[in-house]
Amino acid sequence: MALLLILLCASILVATTRMVGDRKQQNMLVAVLLFAFVARLVFHLTIVRSGVFFSHGFSGGDSVQYEEWAAIIANYWRRHGVVFVTESMMPEIGSTALICNMFALVNFFNDGKSSLGCTALAALVGCLTSLEIYRSSREFGASERGAFTSMILVLFSPAFVFHTSDSYKDGFVAFFTVLSFSGSMRIAKRFSVVQAALLVVWLTGLWLVRFYMVFMCSVPIVVGLLGLKSRSPIRKLLSIVGAIAFVAVAVGGGAMRSSAVSRMVDTYEYSHDSNVTSWNARGGSGVSFDDGGNPFGAIGPKLLYTIASPFPWQGGSFGLHLGKIDVFIFYFLIYRAYLSSRRLFVKDRQTLVQFFSFLVPATVAYATTMANIGLILRQRMPIVFVTAILAALSWAERPAIKRVAAPVRRRAAALPETAERAA
């Protein structure tokens, strides 16, 4: 069963790449993405579960827990039939209901646990995320070189390889985040009912794997719907409806506040609880800040650690040293994003605002909960990937240069000079 699933995932990857890539680049894209897909499976079989990378001293972690929950769901299906198991039915799965059900489907058809089959899904999603970075970069104006460079840097960054070579949820989080953001960019250029429907799908998927990211992705979507330069009456209508809804919720208070907003507030308060912060700071890569209990206290050092850690001079586990490769990649992407930001500030400020509407709030939000270098390395991957799209735009597609032949001198004008030389 695992082998059939691997072949199915590889076929989906090839077919999707054929639909996305330019004809001249399709073969290269297919080869690179297939290599990345197979490499993740090999990495899973040979190293991931047998090696200890981090200071917590054991291999596996979240991935093992998700597989255990998936096995419980699969057993439930065998007795009661296949239904989507939600958090209300199984509270321990929390906001990871989607991946637990997907992995349960693998176990259900395999008639038992299949760690390799679950990893095939994670590897496929990781490769598709990188492909979406390539596609959206090209669509938004990056050159072939820029889009391919950003895709490669993301596809083979050590943290992303590691977390898509096992049954982790991080690849799914990145997948839905990148799709939601690129969808908001497309809807900013041109409103489409299809794109709006797809955004609902991506946000629903994101809600079922890491729900609070939905709120971070909502800001660029709102900016895209408003269309800062658009004169479309549809956008104005959407703006009015959105404003009315916001005022209604604000005025209604607790009685009218949606469960989604309530959950966001509760999660935000929980993430800043001193016990939670201390728990996250355990292990060799934990970090403590003298913030006086205020999440926005010591915000400067927190932002520095959120963006720039692990630092080159820090010692720690093998995983932390691998993370230094990731952070150097991030440094490079930030530099290229700075170059593209300068150009967009002059030519397309709406697009620049849309990028910043995700990158700035997301970075600040994660900085207020910063407590562990290894944890932030995982959490900031969606931020890195959106930065990669912005960075790709620094290699802008240049219009073809038309070469004009030099004007031919009139023969009559050359005659006097010829006669003079002859004399």
Image: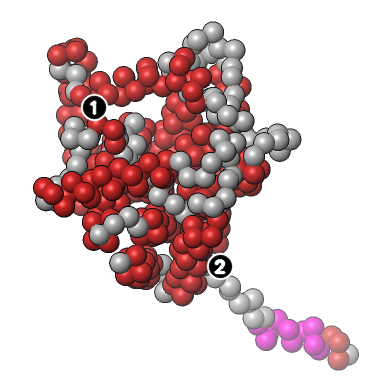
Q: Is residue 267 above or below residue 108?
A: above
The amino acid beneath tag 1 is Ala
Label located before the other in sequence (2 or 1)? 1
Q: Residue at x 19, y 12 (%)?
A: 253
Residue 410 appearing in the image: yes
Q: Check disc 2 and report its element: helix, strand or loop.
A: loop
Q: Residue furthest right?
A: 423
Where's the C terminus, which quadrant? bottom right
Q: Residues within 10 Å of mark 2 (few under 14, many from 20)?
A: few
Q: How many marks?
A: 2
Q: Nearer the viewer, mark 2 or mark 1?
A: 1
Could you say where residue 114 lies in the image, as x and y percent from the top left?
35, 57
Could you say where residue 78 lies in the image, as x and y percent from the top left?
16, 52
Compare residues 342 and 19 and report the one nearer the observer: 19
Q: Which residue is mark 2?
A: 401
Q: Residue at x 34, y 31 (%)?
A: 212
Which residues lie in the magenta part? Answer: 410-419
Residue 169, quarter of picture:
top left
Query: Which numbered disc covers residue 260?
Result: 1
Q: Residues within 10 Å of mark 1 (few under 14, many from 20)?
A: some
Residue 287, quarter of picture:
top right
> Any magenta on residue 417?
yes
Where's the N terminus, which quadrant? bottom left
The amino acid beneath tag 2 is Ile
Could you say where residue 105 lies in the image, as x and y percent from the top left?
24, 54
Residue 176 appearing in the image: no
Question: Do callouts 2 and 1 mark residues in contact (Cβ within 8 Å)?
Answer: no
Q: Is residue 58 above or below residue 40?
A: above
Query: Which numbered disc covers residue 74?
Result: none
Compare residues 43 and 173 and report the one nearer the observer: 43
Predominant secondary structure in magenta?
Answer: helix
